[in-house]
Image (cartoon, coloured by chain):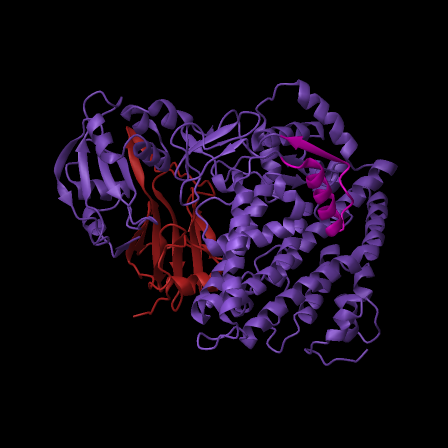
Amino acid sequence: MRQGQPGERNRRDWDDGRGAYHSAITHSRPQGTIPMLTDPRLSFEDRWGSMLDELLVRARISGEAPGHRFDLGRSCECAPIRSKIPGDAECPAWVAHELWLGVRALRDRVVTRESRLEALPGRSVREILDDDSPDPGSVDELAAVAAFNQVVAVFDGQVDEYLNRLAGWALAMDHAADEVRRNDLPSPHESPLSREEMARAERRITELSRAAWSRIRDTAPARRPDVEAGIRAWYGHVGAPAPETIFWVRSPREMSRLVRALTEVVSGSWAALVEARGDVVDSGIQRFRGSLMPETYEHAARYLAAASRRTGTTARIVESVHPAAESHLVSMARAASAVFGWNDAHRLRRDAATRLGGARSRLMESLAWWDTASERPGLGSGPIETTDGTPRPVDTVAALPWLGGLDEAGLAATHAVLEAADSTASAWCWWGFRGFAIACERPAQIQFDDQRRLHAHTGPAIRFRDGWAVSAWHGTPVPHAAIDSGWTPRDILASGNQEVRRAAIEASGGWHEFARRARLQQVGPDVADPGNPGGDPLRLYELPHGLLDEPARLLLVSNASLERDGSRRRYGLLVPPDIDDPLDAAAWTFDLDPALYASLDAAR
Amino acid sequence: MTVTPTLGELLARHHREVLDHLDRNASIPAVTVGRQGDVLVCATIDGAEGTAVPPEGVVLVRGSNDHVLLADGDVRWEDFTMGDLIDEGGPSIGMILVAEGATAYLLHPEHGALAMVGPANYEVIRQREWRGRDATVAD
């Protein structure tokens, strides 16, 4: 093997099957040994930190590579790198951090297994799992050291695989960066493709978008054998043992209830659930089937928050999607550049790369059911969660993936992700744990508007096979009653959520109809909306006596930003009844002096 | 007078996306007082310590879409709500501290971006409505 200079890429090292790890370390240590990992004088974190640091520097072989510090778990300084690589190339330090999380989870698992077999004296499984540092401190030193040495021995056997993967990701990023630096996309004045080839490329993009869209809209039952085989393949793909059991649920609500029940069964700890063996979990599901679900979000919520919304296994699976989809992206960009010309292609490729990142984020979020609004997993008894008594809609991104109006590039990029996700795509979503997985059936019914937003003007917009359903108005989830029986103006104003209130007004006929039904009376003149010269004016209304329990007035405000169809969203905000002027009312909503509010530079 | 980037440049630099019908060629307005949907930023003479804004930004307000604080240069964020994203104490949720030569951006998928140029501090205020008692606008 040719001895490369520091900073020089040696392509043969990648291809010779021994992996980047060996070549990277060999170049840095002519002896070819890796003493750091086994040096007992260094702490666990120090050893791994230094090792990954060195690998990062070597793997990012580039004359411009900054002295990149890998800082465990803390923010990285890689903005200069990212800005050089358009598209969704991941920061290597972040990738390495994710690897570190996987490494640590593996450490915990080994220690857990060992302690179950040997019943480590003086330390419970919980203590070991919760202990971030392997340093034998105040607890039984001998037992802890024995467990730790066992962990190190296991790691040294596994390290090549993990580090090769990290090096592989870094290589994929380098390739993407090279692609951009070489500027090999054709300019608008040269078209290397014939007219026929261009037409074919255009059809291909349309084809990809349609395929992705039809998958999203599919309500046929999931093909369970395919999904299960696909899930097992994903586990194999990331080097984890296949799950012993795969549970099927009918909706994300059932999935969250199952997770909650299982968390209770498995010693009440989310961390333990992540690592649990399938047979332990299986006994738990028997209890789930027969029992009522108690409201015990707190357990799972606490640990879900700590686990950053995904398990190590799931994170690795999702990260594996990216390199596979990257090649789709590049080939799609070539086709797009031929069809649309350089400027559009550049934008399309950048947009598509962002959308790929967005689609991938949404894929991750579909794998981890999380209500970011109320910081809770899943749902309770219905589509609207209450926190302080105020109805709040569920975060639809977490619950219902790929919503929100996708354009052609977005759909094509989503399709790249879907293709990589392969046969598991016929499930609605699935969640990978160490010993088991949970897969969710497709909805029985799902409806969209012409901007591909979840929407139905009667009945729910999405309904799952267990009956759980969500109503939505042009992409905004709302309580069923707002669509079905129709809310009264009192109901509408009682809603504490401005988006739900707005959607409910739209669903009941729009603002004029609402003003008529509520018998609103204008107070004072229309006033120009500060900072929003082209927008609608501010308007203040008196509410009829008795409409609300407490007197109030209503301020009509409009978005400064336009919707896709050119319209503006309108909102009615309750303001104190003793305010007479729309501008004063608007200033009050921001607790600002009216003269200062009037001096607003810009509203968006 | 600082030249602010276009929306597209900001998105590319920070790996973010907005709804695709927003004009990416539009330059981002620099504000002393600015409104983004139901969030207002207002330059203030008050100060705070704050912590550095990481490259991935800080979510200031969660909703159906998030308002995210992004930094070009030395920008710090002081959270008045102690992480509880619905502030019971009043509509002011925190302060953005922008050093000389730096610019902070508030980005939202539906509303685009606002720019806050340093050296200056900006108070961040959530819109509220009247409930007999005050309650924060929620979406």
For the N terminus of chain A, the quadrant is: bottom right
Instruction: Find residue A198 and report its horizontal and vertical position in percent.
Output: 50, 66
Chain painted in purple in the figure? A
Lateral position of residue A556 relative to residue B119, left or right? left
- Residue A91 is covered by the magenta coloring: no
Q: Name the one closer to the observer, A312 or A101.
A: A312
Lateral position of residue A191 relative to residue B32, left or right? right
| Residue at the image point whose x is 75% and y is 39% from the top | A243
The residue segment tinted magenta is A222-249
* A251 versus B103 height, above or below: above
Lateral position of residue A508 relative to residue A90, left or right? left
| Residue at the image point whose x is 45% and y is 53% from the top | A407
Lateral position of residue B25 relative to residue A116, left or right? left
Q: Name the one closer to the observer, A351 or A134.
A: A351
Instruction: Find residue B60 and report its horizontal and vertical position in percent.
Output: 43, 48
Q: Residue furthest right?
A: A118
Q: Quadrant of residue A524?
A: top left
- Residue A226 is covered by the magenta coloring: yes
Instruction: Find residue A471 and report its horizontal and vertical position in percent.
Output: 43, 31
Residue A137 in sight here: no
Q: Quadrant of residue A169?
A: bottom right
Figure label count: 0
Q: Residue furthest left?
A: A524
Instruction: Find residue B81 and report its horizontal and vertical position in percent.
Output: 43, 43
Q: Which color was chain B given?
A: red
Residue A597 in sight here: yes
* A565 versus A340 height, above or below: above
Q: Name the one closer to the observer, A104 or A397.
A: A397
* A120 versus A98 height, above or below: above
* A219 versus A39 height, above or below: above
